């Protein structure tokens, strides 16, 4: 019996990642295509179907080598109905029937979910989760996203807003304005832009000498990476900013831990590349705010799969549904 | 074919509630027995088995009328292994094999869970949840407990601490001491004792005339009920205290909503008997702190089943496992 492959797709606003995987989650072939958002994104699905067919031809494999296709999409989805409520970056109409479109164009059985949820599933299956069936994945990127897995299943909630960890309110009074319309969201202080905002506030409210002040004077801007690099060099201002970020993140994750007691909480996304200097500080605040049983049983770690988490988690969707 | 009954048991530190239910969750017979915690609680399970047999005899029904027994127990449980990690109020050893003991003594197939989780299941099945498969139940009693249901299943977490909503940190710096060892837990301000603590702080820090001050001068103590009664009479101090409680509860539940987007959040326990004056105020703060999709799709309400939630939820456990 020849072994079938799973197709995992991570649909982004700029590029779309596609991969063929074994049913054990081994990445066999992976590649990217540009995401064509012109004409309200009407070519996106056809482009994916073509890319899969071209790749099969290149590999001299028949279509029935593929067992099904899973996709992570950038917006809230109704998984049961297979629709994406909204995908502002792609130009699609509200409630686009993504699963049906995928099945029609590729001829494959399709399952869709939100991209942050797929990243969480990927980390659960093959990453820092080590197979943990209760796992939370927080993505610290331009924004702060998240995926929550309980009893082995993604928590979508009643309207697909499960996992909106970035919109936990961490500053109940007088916080920064968030894109969601609220103020004081975790995203406003723990995303790449959020930590830069904290650093600018700190620089503006003091005159303390700092590597960050020098960088800002020279370049007009500082980056999240500048902040962690300076903290590693023991820069007081930078260390203070990292501690503020870690306080907000540690508090949020501890409270999430107090409610869900997951086996693992995994930090992913660009900001998480800071690694140990971030993790150590977040763990310190997490332990202060976690219920004793949670403190000793819920573990924090940095994501392992990087950009592959999405396609691996997407493939997991079909592994389970076929 | 004669219809079988389910047995639901809600094991408490003082009394044990027992009920026979139809498989549709109709309460057919319910009664209570004292919980005998003498001799490290060694009679507890035998007493329950006897009570069930006596009741069957009284009703002139054979043992095989019963399809199985579900029990909510006062402590964290490992549901798969059927053990209760700890039940300090009952005098039992750590890791008591409760499911096995129940099966041996009653001769029935048994399933156990934590009592707060059973209350949540009861509300999901027959109470304010109206069958919602994503539901959070918060019990505002002497302490603050909780049960979290996602995708129709209780979230236990890796060490049974799922649902410890009372230990969400709401005052990160300088909060009251909690029994769990932390400070600033929701339980320290939103339980029956917590709201009294808030009221005493308020009375001590001002000289404002208040019904509560009169009651305290007269009786030395005030109760949670006094506070809500006074707030209903437009007492400023009492209204301020209810608003503080509602702020902490609304913030916690909104953040929980932002992560889980449940269909319903149900408030139960003694404090919830305050009804609309509490609910209206909590909803107001909830809406400020909830992500827009959550604000419009997650609904708060007061629990409906009162003391019956536990036995109904316990019966649900067996309905599903037999």
Image (tube, coloured by chain):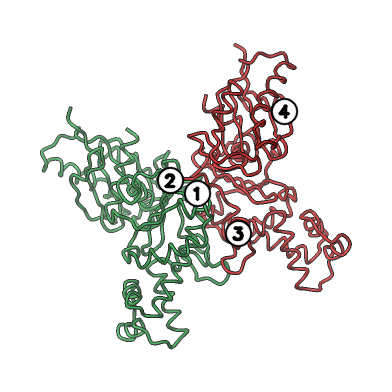
Chain colours: A red, B green
Location of residue B20 by image quarter: top left
Query: Do the CB atoms of the residues marked 1 and 2 lie less than 8 Å apart?
Result: yes
Q: CA distance from mark 3 to mark 1?
A: 16 Å
Residue annotated with mark 2: B134
Q: Secondary structure at mark 1?
A: helix
Q: Give whichever of B258, B1 is nearer the camera.
A: B258
Q: CA distance from mark 2 to mark 3?
A: 23 Å
Residue annotated with mark 3: A185
Residue annotated with mark 1: B260
Query: Do the CB atoms of the residues marked 4 and 3 lie less than 8 Å apart?
Result: no
Q: Give whichever of A165, B101 is nearer the camera.
A: A165
The quadrant of the picture occupied by the N terminus of chain A is: top right
| Mark 1 crowd level (few <14, some 14–19, many ≥20, 10 Å Cα) | many
Kindly identify which chain the residue marked by label 4 belongs to: A
Kindly identify which chain the residue marked by label 2 belongs to: B
Residue annotated with mark 4: A30
Q: Is residue B63 above or below residue A291?
A: above
**Which residue is farthest top?**
A1
Q: CA distance from mark 1 to mark 2?
A: 8 Å
Q: CA distance from mark 2 to mark 4?
A: 36 Å
Q: Are marks 4 and 1 on the same chain?
A: no
């Amino acid at each position: 019996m020849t072994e079938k492959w799973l197709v995992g797709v991570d649909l982004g606003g700029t590029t779309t990642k596609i991969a063929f995987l074994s049913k054990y989650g081994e990445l066999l072939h992976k590649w990217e295509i540009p995401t064509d958002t012109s004409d309200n994104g009407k070519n996106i699905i056809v482009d994916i179907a073509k890319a899969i067919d071209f790749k099969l031809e290149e590999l001299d494999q028949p279509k029935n080598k593929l067992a099904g296709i899973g996709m992570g999409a950038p917006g809230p989805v109704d998984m049961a109905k297979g629709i994406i409520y909204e995908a502002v970056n792609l130009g699609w109409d509200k409630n686009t029937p993504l699963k049906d479109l995928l099945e029609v164009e590729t001829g494959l059985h399709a399952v869709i979910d939100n991209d942050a949820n797929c990243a969480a599933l990927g980390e659960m299956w093959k990453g820092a989760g080590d197979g943990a069936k209760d796992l939370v994945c927080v993505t610290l990127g331009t924004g702060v996203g998240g995926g929550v897995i309980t009893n082995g299943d993604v928590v979508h909630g009643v309207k697909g807003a499960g996992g909106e960890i970035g919109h936990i309110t961490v500053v109940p009074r007088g916080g920064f304005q968030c894109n969601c319309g609220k103020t004081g969201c975790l995203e406003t202080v723990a995303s790449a832009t959020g930590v830069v905002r904290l650093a600018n506030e700190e620089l503006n409210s003091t005159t303390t000498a700092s590597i960050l002040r020098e960088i800002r004077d020279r370049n007009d801007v500082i980056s999240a990476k500048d902040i962690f690099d300076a903290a590693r060099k023991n820069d007081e201002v930078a260390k203070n900013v990292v501690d503020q970020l870690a306080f907000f993140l540690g508090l949020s994750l501890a409270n999430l831990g107090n409610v869900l007691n997951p086996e693992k909480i995994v930090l992913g996304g660009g900001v998480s590349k800071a690694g140990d200097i971030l993790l150590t500080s977040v763990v310190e605040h997490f332990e202060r705010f976690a219920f004793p049983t949670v403190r000793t049983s819920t573990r924090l770690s940095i994501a392992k799969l990087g950009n592959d988490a999405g396609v691996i988690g997407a493939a997991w969707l079909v592994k389970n549904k076929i």
